Amino acid sequence: MEKTNFTIVKESLKLHLNIPSNNYLDHIYFVIPDQDLDLDLNYDVFKDSKLNIKVIILGSNDLKINCFLNANLKSHYNHIEFEILAYANDNANIKIISNVDVELKTIDNKSKQTLIGVLLSDQAKILGEPNLKINSLNVNAKHSLRIGTLDKDEIFYLLTKGLPLEQAKQILINAIVTKLISNLSNEEQTWCFQKIKERIR
């Protein structure tokens, strides 16, 4: 398996990539903006390829962040997975739209879209929209959307163990992101956790 690519996104970024036949792409985008930002990722996927895209968004202050992911499955035997995790603090406003388009007469394509939003203040907003456009009968496709706050029962449990509130919240925040960055190097994981600690509380 190829190395996971890791990109830090601090300003708007738009990409349109062709994923050729018999190819594998594993990529993590870590979004830490200081200003309003649009992330627009578009993939045309050809025969027998695997695309695994993860996006982690840290939204704070009054920032508006728009994330658009689009995959067009143009041939057979592809496996596509989008995983988007967004943290919204302060007055941040985050919009996530994920699209998978399976073209006509293709066979044995698989797709999965997972969108998770974590609201860390009463003023923060997250809008998520996973979309499927399927023009072929032979498809295995799933999508899910979950937006909410940190689990109050889990926070209470950690508090009963003597942890201060901020540390309890940080443990739960880190637990959600751990799976997404598990393929990164130790140095990259440490950097991610440090940035989360600095920006998300």
Image (cartoon, rainbow, N blue to C red):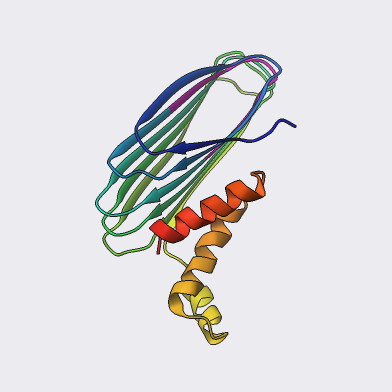
Residue in front for this viewpoint, 96 or 192: 192
Question: Residue lying farthest front?
Answer: 187
Q: Is residue 107 above or below residue 129?
A: above
What range of the chain is rendered magenta?
A: 41-54
Question: Residue lying farthest right?
Answer: 1
Tell me where residue 132 appears, x and y as whole percent: 49, 31
Which residue is at 67% across, 44% downward? 183
Give the quadrant of the C terminus. Answer: bottom left
Note whether residue 142 is visible.
yes
Q: Is residue 171 above or below residue 137?
A: below
Tell me where residue 101 appears, x and y as whole percent: 50, 23
Magenta stretch secondary structure, dominant: strand
Tell me where residue 143 appears, x and y as whole percent: 53, 41
Q: Taking 194 as reference, is 185 left or right?
A: right
Which residue is at 32% across, 54% downward? 60
Give the quadrant of the N terminus. Answer: top right
Q: Taking 60 as reference, is 182 left or right?
A: right
Note whether residue 181 is visible.
no
Residue 26 placement: quadrant: top right
Q: How many marks?
A: 0
Q: Is residue 170 magenta?
A: no
Tell me where residue 144 appears, x and y as whole percent: 52, 46
Q: Is residue 11 above or below residue 91?
A: above
Q: Is residue 72 above or below residue 194?
A: above
Q: Is residue 52 magenta?
A: yes
